[in-house]
Image (tube, coloured by chain):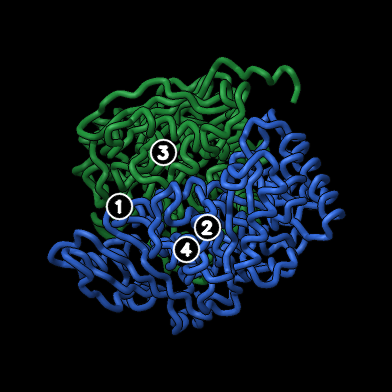
Chain colours: A blue, B green
Amino acid sequence: MSDSLSRLGAERLVVTYLLAGAGTDPQARAREICFEQTVEFPEDLVPAGFIRDEVIGRVESVMEAGPGCFRAEISFPVESTARELLQLMNVVFGNISIKPGIRVERMSLPGALLRSFRGPRFGREGLRSRTKVSRRPLLCTALKPMGLAAAQLADQARQFALGGIDLIKDDHGLTDQPYATFSERVARCCEAVAEANARTGRRCVYVPNVTGRSDHLLARVDEARRRGAGALLVSPFLTGLDAMRQLADDEGVALPILAHPAFGGSFVTCATTGIAHGVLYGQLMRLAGADASIYPNFGGRFSFTREECEAIATATAEPMGTIAPIFPAPGGGMTVDRVPDMLEVYGREFILLMGAGLHRRGPDLAENARFFVDLLESM
Amino acid sequence: MSDSLSRLGAERLVVTYLLAGAGTDPQARAREICFEQTVEFPEDLVPAGFIRDEVIGRVESVMEAGPGCFRAEISFPVESTARELLQLMNVVFGNISIKPGIRVERMSLPGALLRSFRGPRFGREGLRSRTKVSRRPLLCTALKPMGLAAAQLADQARQFALGGIDLIKDDHGLTDQPYATFSERVARCCEAVAEANARTGRRCVYVPNVTGRSDHLLARVDEARRRGAGALLVSPFLTGLDAMRQLADDEGVALPILAHPAFGGSFVTCATTGIAHGVLYGQLMRLAGADASIYPNFGGRFSFTREECEAIATATAEPMGTIAPIFPAPGGGMTVDRVPDMLEVYGREFILLMGAGLHRRGPDLAENARFFVDLLESM
């Protein structure tokens, strides 16, 4: 080991954990995390000097946060993350994800670490400029239901584009089923949206779902690009977080990314374990290169609270080095009645994701879409 | 859509869910899952005919499973999974992972689906033949602690190999830190283990951790292969499950894979949500190509119960089409006193993962290793 490594950088990554059921010795519990997340070695076996002084996590503070519940701030050397997203998540919540009663409440990422991440390529500003929507919330819908043929999905896309929807994504369950294969669906939907754009003069963006086999991911993205897709839908809890980061960083891809929360819900559904909503859907999606983070809004058919959604919205835009703000994209059973509440929480800076709600008003999907676009424009 | 798709295959994927707090209408709750996991569309909007009759999940049974708790069997068409691992997981637990009170208790995968998966390339038999250990449990240890230089880690590897350890893996937190970069660590550890093997005549296998950037994964694997690594350590909840499947399927890789559970604990830590231990660490790891599945054993420093570990062990070997049995690799604070209990639960068919326990007996790591190998051989 070179001499320059005998001391590590002064800036450290600080993670705030909520410890439930920490009993009478929350300090010891916090100290356990310091060891588990770095050296994974009993304290008495850790060599004195560099490793003990520098590598191991450090308890910065422990405070009571409720009955039997404590908030611990623990700092880790930036070097322990190898400046890679997956190892960062491993340090923050790798092994201790398996221990009950530990929840990641906040990550404070120092400049020395943030500089290793580009984050979203487009962010809010880039998505607004792509869709030519300068002031109001963006309107996004999903092609569904699974089981329709590619031609039927493309027809839906055409109507939505004619009606003025900004972003038309595949439903996240559409991948490469025989009902509508990836290739046929993407070809037809790209064509339909391009035709509609030519008629309306708008810049509606079709967002195919590229989530699928790891070894096919880049080929699907490439095919989507060549056909004219304007953005990509990725479910990072399925593909792995870094696959999304890779797509965002790739100059040859250069398409906005909408992140879908499928398969990652277990991080948030239990209040005493996992990762807080703002960290998971805000900080982490942003760090991993999403331009918009989809999640279920409060008051829909999922159970997120207004406060949890506010935390997500805050995390999508709070200062984070040079990493751009991204759009929160709340959805999950949204109807017209929910819009005023959403404007109150998110201001103009969100993507309204409306699926079935756009089918409810009547059989003419273009007409239904127009109604919602007009509504958003009038607000 | 071709006529042949007007009916789907008769064999369906069956998932057993445990529904907590399902209240007075568990049938309705189960039916919600059928829609959420396929069409994600309200029942009254789903077109009659093919989609309603064939694509949507089907409630096969709902039974009481305890106070306010029900067990629902729901079947899905194999076609909905597109025969891809990630979409399979998306159908099983994509959106509903975000709804509290739903736990995947079991997956019954029909032959029509299993035929699309190769599973582990080596399995128990292949790992035994690689390491030339025919009867006793295999002994695995980890190079640690993080912060040691590559030369120090390699020295540890040499001693362990001389002492007769079968599998020497990187600690899962070692990736590409400046203390011991991937390249230097892998080169030195491969060399050290090869030298030791030449002296002992044994077939000790070094298992570098290749978890890291998505776009570097194949390069790291290739480098590890060229240097002579005998297996790979992957943390699939970080890399994405399908990245591990890709490595297992790749003829050009052809190395055994040890799966590490880091970052995936939130699936199991809350009893009323997530995925049951046997499904996550057994069925799923096997389907995703791991040859051994690492998890914390009962009685160590994590909180898995004996029954949960038994469920994992069962799932690593139960009939699963042509997919081979894999090794359970329990670890997490194992000491010599735990061995009799482990033999009782796992028989001879497991990998004993011992980290710090191998450092405890004294400063001579080769001697410590010999003690444990002799112990296992005598049992």
Instruction: Write the residue at 55% across / 75% down.
Output: A114
Would you say the residues marked 1 and 3 are in contact, meaning their CB atoms lie under 8 Å apart?
no
Instruction: Write the residue at 53% across / 53% down.
Output: A331
Q: Residues within 10 Å of mark 2 (few under 14, many from 20)?
A: many
From this view, report whether residue A102 is shown above or below residue B367. below
Q: Which residue is mark 3?
A: B280
Q: Position of residue A334 (x, y in %)?
A: 52, 51
- From the viewer's perspective, tell me whether residue B161 is left or right of residue B373: right
Q: CA distance from mark 1 to mark 3?
A: 28 Å
Q: Amino acid at mark 3?
A: Leu
Viewer-side label of 2, 4 = 4
Instruction: Write the residue at 34% across / 78% down.
Output: A53
Whether discs 1 and 3 lie on one chain: the answer is: yes
Q: Which residue is mark 4?
A: A341
Q: CA distance from mark 4 to mark 1?
A: 59 Å
Viewer-side label of 1, 3 = 3
Q: Which residue is mark 2?
A: A330
Would you say the residues marked 4 and 1 are in contact, meaning their CB atoms lie under 8 Å apart?
no
Chain letter of the residue carrying label 3: B
Q: Amino acid at mark 2?
A: Pro
Q: Which residue is mark 1?
A: B358
Q: CA distance from mark 2 to mark 3?
A: 29 Å
Whether discs 3 and 4 lie on one chain: the answer is: no
Occupied quadrant, residue A322: bottom right
From this view, report whether residue B2 is shown above or below residue A377. above
Q: Position of residue B100 (x, y in %)?
A: 36, 45
Task: Please state, as top left, top right, bottom left or bottom right, where the C terminus of chain A lies in the image.
Answer: bottom right
Q: Amino acid at mark 1?
A: Leu
